[in-house]
Image: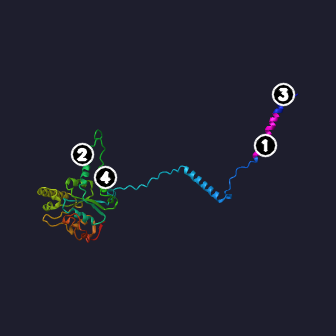
């Protein structure tokens, strides 16, 4: 009779035998299962091989498109070198002001001076541009109350720096071509700056400037010009005012060194014309040029207009104008 313990031993041995047998069968079967192989597309027909190649290419392109584009650092555009006003950085720059009383020959002087050399550029009338500029300068220098504290607290004024800034601004205002070009003489022609106090301010802000002063002795003929007929109702008062302005300009000129002021009236007190080739040849020398001479004079406001005949410019100067060493 089989005991209970013997039965358990037989059962455990049977289960162990069956488990070992099962594992042996599974292991044997697994060893014979072929591993998946990469298909050889060369054995496929051409049409199938073409479709498979296209599929692989499209899948690659799709995967590339799904990837975010590479981040490139932003490129800063190249910066142009800063430009500085040559008016103060180039010691050879000479400021020149052609100042007159209107219908007195300032435009003729302007064109004659600009014809001397391509190193000269004198701009035409600025409609009194310098007047508010000089007023601002004078205001900053005198009217502006500068104190250490309180409602008028302000730092001390650097006067040379302010003057330099004004010269810088005027240079830029004349135009970008003048700003960057290498001109030796730069200036303005104007008929609205004749007051002696304003001339003193110009002299102060432009300490190395030269001044060509122009007026008419025959103020009666000057007052009858079309320019003044439109502005003045009382011709006698106009003539008196023009005479006074001319006298003030002459008095101011006497106080200046010869290298600073050059007087060039349209005519003398007895009616002799001063606009002659010889007078402008003296002007060439005064401006610091040599080796050339004017052979005639341009009349810029002839026949009631402000444009000179281009033909008259032909043969205007003989020789080559060069700056004296």
Disc 4 to disc 2, how far (Cα)? 19 Å
- Answer with mark 1 or mark 2, whichever residue precedes in sequence: 1
Where does the image place residue 146, in percent across and percent down from the top left?
A: 28, 43
Comparing marks 3 and 2, which lies closer to the viewer? 3
Residue highlighted by disc 3:
4
User: What kind of colouring is applied to the model shown?
Assistant: rainbow
**Residue 297 located within the stretch drawn in magenta:** no
Q: Residue 195 carries which label?
A: none
> Could you tell me if the residues under marks 1 and 2 are in contact, i.e. CB atoms within 8 Å?
no
Q: In which quarter of the image is the N terminus?
A: top right
Q: How crowded is mark 1: few (under 14 residues within 10 Å), some or many (20 or more)?
A: few
Determine the residue positioned at 76% across, 45% down. Answer: 29
In screen coordinates, is 65 left or right of 99?
right
Q: Quadrant of the C terminus?
A: bottom left
Q: Which mark is residue 165?
A: 4
Where does the image place residue 219, in percent across and percent down from the top left?
A: 14, 60
- Label 4 sits on a secondary structure element that is helix
- Answer with mark 4 or mark 2, whichever residue precedes in sequence: 2
Disc 3 to disc 2, how far (Cα)? 129 Å
Q: Residues within 10 Å of mark 3 (few under 14, many from 20)?
A: few
Q: In this view of the protein, which residue sits in the foreground, 257 or 57?
A: 57
Residue highlighted by disc 1:
25
Determine the residue positioned at 25% across, 64% down. Answer: 111
Comparing marks 1 and 2, which lies closer to the viewer? 1
User: Which residues are the magenta region?
Assistant: 12-30
Q: In this view of the protein, which residue sits in the foreground, 209 or 218?
A: 218
């Amino acid at each position: 009779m089989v005991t209970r313990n013997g039965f358990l031993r037989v059962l455990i041995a049977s289960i162990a035998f069956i488990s070992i047998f099962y594992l042996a069968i599974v292991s044997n079967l697994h060893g014979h299962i072929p591993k998946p192989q990469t298909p050889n597309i060369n054995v496929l027909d051409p049409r199938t091989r073409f479709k498979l190649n296209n599929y692989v290419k499209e899948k690659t392109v799709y995967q590339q498109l799904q990837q975010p584009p590479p981040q490139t650092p932003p490129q800063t555009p190249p910066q142009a070198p800063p430009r500085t006003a040559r008016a103060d950085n180039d010691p050879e720059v000479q400021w020149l002001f052609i100042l007159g009383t209107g219908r007195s020959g300032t435009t003729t002087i302007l064109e004659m001076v600009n014809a001397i050399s391509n190193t000269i550029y004198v701009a035409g009338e600025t409609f009194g541009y310098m007047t508010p500029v000089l007023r601002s300068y004078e205001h900053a220098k005198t009217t502006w109350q500068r104190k250490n504290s309180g409602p008028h607290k302000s730092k001390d004024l650097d006067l040379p720096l302010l003057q330099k800034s004004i010269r810088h601004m005027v240079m830029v205002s004349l135009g970008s071509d003048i700003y960057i070009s290498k001109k030796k003489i730069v200036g303005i022609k104007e008929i609205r700056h004749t007051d002696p106090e304003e001339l003193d301010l110009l002299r102060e802000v432009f300490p190395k400037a030269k001044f060509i002063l122009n007026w008419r002795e025959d103020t009666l003929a000057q007052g009858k010009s079309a320019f003044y007929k439109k502005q003045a109702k009382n011709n006698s008062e106009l003539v008196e005012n023009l005479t006074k302005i001319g006298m003030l300009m002459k008095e101011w000129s006497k106080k200046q060194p010869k290298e600073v002021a050059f007087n060039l009236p349209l005519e003398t007190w007895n009616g002799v014309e001063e606009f002659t080739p010889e007078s402008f040849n003296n002007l060439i020398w005064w401006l610091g040029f040599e080796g050339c001479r004017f052979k005639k004079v341009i009349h810029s406001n002839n026949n009631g207009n402000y444009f000179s005949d281009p033909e008259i410019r032909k043969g205007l100067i003989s020789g080559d104008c060069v700056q004296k060493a």
